[in-house]
Amino acid sequence: MPVSFDEIMSDLRNRIYKPVYFLAGDEPYYIDLITDFIAEKVLTEAERAFNQVVLYGEETTIGSIIEISRRFPMMASHQVVIVKEAQSMKKIEDLALYLEKPLLSTILVFNYKYKSLDKRTKLYKALGGSYFESVRLRDYQVQPWIERYLMTKGIKINPEAAVMLTEYLGTDLHKIVNELDKLLITLPEGKPVITTSLIEKNIGISKEYNNFELQKAIGEKNLLKANMIVRYFEANPKDNPLLLTIVSLFGYFTKILTYHYLTDKSENNAAAALKINPFFVKDYKTAASRYSAGKTIRIINLLRTYDLRSKGFGDERTEPGELLKELVYYILHL
């Protein structure tokens, strides 16, 4: 069975080491955290000079890696061998031969980023608890992840601010952590709460003109505010790409449709079904009162049409700003 990130890190902190760590998956953040910890904490600085080797998949072979891994450490309890970009290697399945009898004084780390092993292969089965797969977060998992990350540092974030960051940063954890750490540096002393104003000031996301505020304005059928945001997006296309806005609205109206068909529309049940903070349930309740299930389905189909048009299918001339104006007009007047 694959091992979890928390299990790996707990063992590493307690100096319980496996002879092999095969770190795979499409989310590099956890792969890098584990690798960096092993690279920096297992050996002392003096020990690393003779006992730590970093190799690259395109520049080496499994045979060479096995040969190096079978060497004994010099004046240290372990040697560390790190293979970066292992996804570029040929015949990586030959690693199964080494796994039959790995050298316990070697810690062999494979960074197999943006891919995962076929679960049917001999290599996967031989790795067992040495295999870790880092899976990219789904959109709905990002906001809770941000809140948990900040909580570990004793910091809170307003729900609106968490949604703003989620909409802007997407699911790339390296990017998310980088921006969060910037915000932590700028937090006023004695005020451990991240707000929309702090984000606007230090990251450059407008707290008034963003996809979250556009959703809210459309949900309330606030024509003036929705059109102001659309004009702002048109004037700042690089910071507000049309495709991202369409994806955001698609997710929003999909949740509205889900809300329509909930039998139990209580706050906690709706929040769980929609995968949102309970704080925002009232917004979906408001939107559902303005857009019937039938209208919501038509809007979702409309969004699919404009998604294709934004990619040049059946429309190569209309500018993104004009497409967004059309789209929002039709949504608001359905």
Image (cartoon, rainbow, N blue to C red):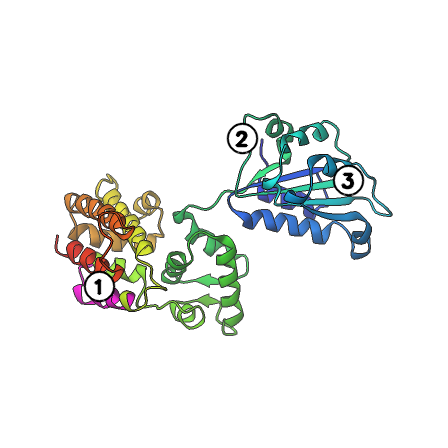
Front one among 39 and 291: 39
259 relative to 183 in the view: left or right? left
Residue pictured at 42% horizontal, 73% vertical? 201
Mark 2 → mark 3, Cα distance in angstroms = 26 Å
Label of residue 68 in the image: 3
Does the magenta portion include 232?
yes
Instruction: Report the mark closest to the observer, 2 or 1.
Output: 2
Which quadrant would residue 164 be assigned to in this image?
bottom left
Query: What residue did someone put label 2 on?
Result: 118
In the structure shown, which secondary structural element does the residue marked by tag 3 occupy?
Answer: helix
Label 2 amino acid? Answer: Asp
Q: Which residues are magenta?
A: 220-233
Q: Position of residue 59 (x, y in %)?
A: 67, 44
Q: Position of residue 102 (x, y in %)?
A: 75, 32
Please report whichever mark, 2 or 1, sits nearer to the chain's N-terminal start: 2
Mark 1 → mark 3, Cα distance in angstroms = 62 Å
Instruction: Report the mark closest to the observer, 1 or 3.
Output: 3
Residue pictured at 16% horizontal, 50% vertical? 291
Mark 3 surroundings within 10 Å by alpha-carbon count, few (fewer than 14), some (14 through 19), many (20 or more): some
Query: What residue did someone put label 1 on?
Result: 226
